[in-house]
């Protein structure tokens, strides 16, 4: 599979990452550059997808970065793994739901590698973990598709500070919680980015025509 794999060691400003994704989208659309998988962390930022509501901002003093991805309000910061991609679906099955399943299965299979059981929720997009009988989100998914090229990606909470989530209603869901892998398991997650990349590429093959 002809996909460029990129990893950034230092936290990236959200706006800079978005600009780079948009630029790659145009080049992939013209078949002038490879598809992309980009793993990084963001500097602290609250982002709003196309379906967000101002009612979901609990602390009116925070600054919100609007974006064209799907979804609602969320928070990004150090300790959270951001998995971005620019994937051309024109030569694969043009099925958005199946592509979302590729993302979901990638995360679930990767967490299972660390003996962590997670699941999807038909009503609430993302990946969830059962924590003492309460569903808590461990990964948020936000995707946009432009002329059958999918971009943006997902965010997996690993060691990030969860306090900023108290300033918003994450993803518009008020009756469930947010957690990270550090609170669930004491395992070493240093190689989780490589496992996610491997599983994502493997799952992408299910979309081949």
Image (cartoon, rainbow, N blue to C red):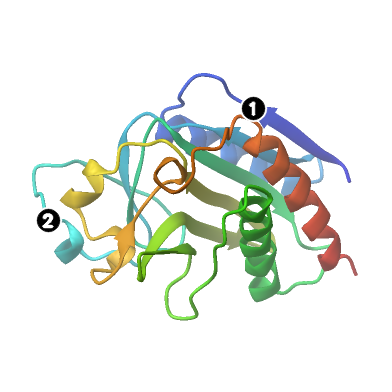
Position of 48 with respect to 60 (left or right) is right
Determine the image quadrant of residue 48: bottom left
Residue extending farthest left: 60
Residue density around tag 1, few if under 14, some if 14–19, many if 20 or more, within 10 Å? few
Q: Label 2: which residue? A: 58
Residue extending farthest top: 10
The span from disc 1 to disc 2 (Cα, nearest Å) is 33 Å
Determine the image quadrant of residue 55: bottom left
SS state under label 1: strand
State the residue in front, 79 or 47: 79
Q: Residue at x 9, y 49 (%)?
A: 60
Compared to 18, does 51 lie above or below? below
State the residue in front, 153 or 128: 128
Residue 64 is situated, as x and y percent measured from the top left of the image, at: 24, 45
State the residue in front, 96 or 194: 194
Residue 33: in sight, yes or no? Answer: no
Determine the image quadrant of residue 194: top right
Residue 188 is situated, as x and y percent measured from the top left of the image, at: 57, 32
Of the numbered discs in the image, which one, if any, rests on residue 7?
A: 1
Position of 153 with respect to 102 (left or right) is left
Compared to 195, does 168 lie above or below? below
Residue 105 is situated, as x and y percent measured from the top left of the image, at: 67, 63
State the residue in front, 45 or 139: 139
- Placement of the C terminus among the 4 image quadrants: bottom right
Residue density around tag 2, few if under 14, some if 14–19, many if 20 or more, within 10 Å? few
Q: Residue at x 74, y 45 (%)?
A: 28
Of the numbered discs in the image, which one, if any, rests on residue 148?
A: none
Residue 83: in sight, yes or no? Answer: yes
């Amino acid at each position: 599979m002809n996909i460029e794999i990129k990893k950034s060691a230092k936290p990236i400003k959200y706006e800079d990452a978005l600009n780079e994704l948009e630029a790659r989208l145009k080049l992939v659309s013209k078949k002038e550059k490879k598809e992309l998988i980009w793993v990084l962390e963001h500097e602290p930022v609250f982002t709003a997808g196309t379906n967000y509501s101002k009612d979901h901002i609990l602390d009116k003093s925070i600054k919100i970065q609007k974006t064209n991805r799907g979804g609602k309000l969320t928070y990004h910061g150090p300790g959270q793994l951001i998995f971005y991609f620019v994937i051309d679906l024109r030569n694969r099955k043009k099925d958005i739901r199946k592509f979302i399943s590729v993302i979901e299965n990638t995360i679930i299979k990767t967490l299972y590698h660390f003996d962590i059981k997670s699941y999807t929720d038909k009503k609430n997009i993302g990946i969830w973990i059962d924590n003492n009988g309460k569903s808590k989100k461990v990964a948020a998914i936000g995707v946009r598709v432009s002329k059958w090229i999918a971009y943006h990606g997902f965010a997996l909470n690993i060691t990030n500070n969860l306090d900023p989530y108290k300033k918003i209603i994450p993803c518009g869901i008020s009756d469930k919680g947010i957690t990270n892998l550090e609170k669930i398991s004491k395992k070493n997650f240093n190689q989780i980015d490589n496992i996610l990349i491997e599983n994502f590429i493997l799952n992408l093959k299910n979309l081949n025509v």
